[in-house]
Amino acid sequence: MQSPVRDYLTEVLDSLDAERGGAVADYIPDLAEANPDLFAIAVTTVDGRTYCVGDDEVEFSIQSISKPLAYAAALADRGFDTVLEKVGVEPSGEAFNELSLESGTCRPRNPMINAGAITTHGLLVDDDADVESRVERARSFFSTLAGRELTVDQALHKSEMDSADRNLAIAHMLRNYGIVDDAPHDIVDGYIQQCSIMVTAKDLAVIGACFANGGVHPVTGERVMSRRIARQVMSVMAGCGMYDGAGEWLTTVGIPAKSGVAGGLLGTLPGQCGIAVFSPRLDEHGNSTRGVLTFRRLSTDMNMHMVDAE
Ligand code: GLN
């Protein structure tokens, strides 16, 4: 169906279609096979209208965009005190897969880098949870947010597990400092299954709108998380979601956001909308090149910087 919003998004998509900067992630063998030219933009407003253009039906793995969602689930399952004791909220200014912890507390600095996300995954459900129940908690919560049943791509999970030395090193470091108790292999296995949940750009826009709408699902009207959790997650995304590109992102785009290495980028503008872009070529920070350019355009054209938004 034609609409002025859709026409505008089509114009943005067409204007960035020739952009070929960056490269697909190749440290996960299956991701190296991705079609680099795919491109989709989707926006869901807090009153539940979705506008999608391009390859909006194509599924891709959620990867690091799972991190803020799992953080929301862990806050709901374990409460703020338990989660904050294990994972901080300070921007690290480092790459997503850095082997580093906060000095003094030995906590990962925030839940958006891998060390923090592996810890957060381990907090899902309760102390007795096993790999299967944590993955199912993530999958079913993400499905509730998306408004449809999502699945884990087990072939992709296996492909990443076969080359997960860096995440295994992070999990060993976390156990050494008493941040996690689980066997490093198990916790990384669960975290990587969480990263292998398949979504479309449309799913991500709807998910973003759940946060933007203060925790109420924009389509079903169901409360899917508390207002406090939605605020906490959006705040952490604003400060840490774009890794070592976070400061530039905040000044130039000003929309709390999270990227994933499969090329997804989710933004959430409080009180307004969820925004998603999918385009697999990544810049030097591991963020989708066209995704960043699309958000810059939207932020400028539509006055979406959170400091300007009314
Ligand atoms: N599964 C990926 C990893 O742990 C997710 C990273 C990302 O999307 N930035 O390396």
Image (cartoon, rainbow, N blue to C red):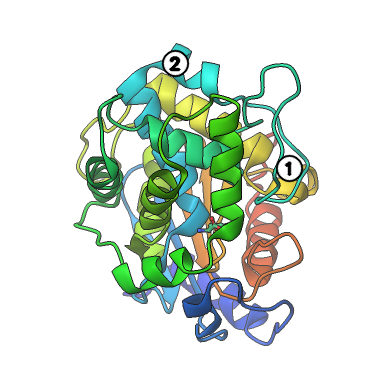
The image quadrant of residue 247 is top right
Counting from the top left corner in percent of width and height, residue 306 is at 64, 37
Counting from the top left corner in percent of width and height, residue 165 is at 58, 59
Q: Is residue 223 visible?
A: yes
Tag 2: amino acid: Thr
Q: Is residue 213 visible?
A: no
Q: Nearer the viewer, residue 236 or 63?
A: 63
Looking at the rendered image, the quarter that the C terminus falls into is top right
Tag 1: amino acid: Leu
Relative placement, left or right, of 162 versus 149 is right
Foreground mark, 2 or 1? 2
Q: Nearer the viewer, residue 225 or 80?
A: 80
How many numbered marks are there?
2
Numbered disc 2: secondary structure: helix
The image quadrant of residue 2 is bottom left
The disc at residue 82 is: 2
> Which numbered disc, 2 or 1, marks the residue that appears first in the sequence?
2
Looking at the rendered image, the quarter that the N terminus falls into is bottom left
Residue shown at 66% from the left, 53% from the top = 299
Q: Is residue 252 above or below residue 69?
A: below
Image-quarter location of ligand 1: bottom right
Q: Nearer the viewer, residue 147 or 50?
A: 147
Residue shown at 39% from the left, 22% from the top = 227
Numbered disc 1: secondary structure: helix
The alpha-carbon separation of the residues under discs 2 and 1 comes to 28 Å
Label 2, residues with CA under 10 Å away: few <14, some 14-19, many ≥20: few
Residue beneath label 1, please?
250
Of all residues, the one furthest to the top in this rendering is 81
Q: Is residue 300 above or below residue 290?
A: above
Q: Is residue 50 above or below residue 307?
A: below
